[in-house]
Amino acid sequence: MVVQVKKRKKAMVLREDCVACGACLKVCPVNATVIYRGIFAVIDSARCIGCSRCATICPASAINMKELE
């Protein structure tokens, strides 16, 4: 029997692509995202649960999900 382990993921912001629209703030169920000085989003990796809602909603495609090792 082979047991597959689901890898955990966390959201990461590509700062140079972020337009600070705040869409990610509205969909995060654990409030892990803030807009830093109106310039770009910052995601608290300790709070992020890896649901990928922010990455899905981001109009600039500035949020990617990264697998943790």
Image (tube, rainbow, N blue to C red):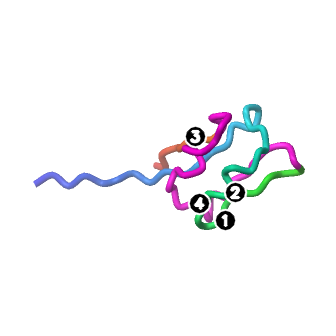
Overall secondary structure of the magenta section: loop
Q: Which residue is mark 1?
A: 31
Q: Which residue is mark 2?
A: 25
Residue type (three-letter) at the residue carrying disc 3: Asn
Residue contact at pointers 2 and 1, CB within 8 angstroms: yes
**CA–CA distance in space, label 4 to label 2:** 12 Å
Looking at the image, tell me whether mark 3 or mark 2 is earlier in sequence order: 2
> Is label 2 in a helix, a strand or a loop?
helix
Residue type (three-letter) at the residue carrying disc 4: Cys
Task: Find the magenta span and give its range.
Answer: 38-62
Residue 64: give its label: 3
In the image, which is nearer the foreground, mark 4 or mark 2?
2
Q: Which residue is mark 4?
A: 48
Residue type (three-letter) at the residue carrying disc 1: Asn
* Viewer-nearest residue: 3 or 34: 34
**CA–CA distance in space, label 3 to label 2:** 15 Å
Residue 55 x, y percent position in the rendering: 58, 44
Residue type (three-letter) at the residue carrying disc 2: Leu
Looking at the image, tell me whether mark 3 or mark 4 is earlier in sequence order: 4
> Is label 1 in a helix, a strand or a loop?
loop
Q: Quadrant of residue 45?
A: bottom right
Residue at figure coordinates x 54%, y 52% from the top left:
53
Q: State yes or no: residue 12 in magenta.
A: no
* Crowdedness near tag 4: few (<14), some (14–19) or many (≥20) residues, C-alpha within 10 Å: some
Looking at the image, tell me whether mark 1 or mark 3 is earlier in sequence order: 1
Image quadrant occupied by the N terminus: bottom left
Residue contact at pointers 1 and 3, CB within 8 angstroms: no
Looking at the image, tell me whether mark 2 or mark 1 is earlier in sequence order: 2
**CA–CA distance in space, label 1 to label 3:** 17 Å
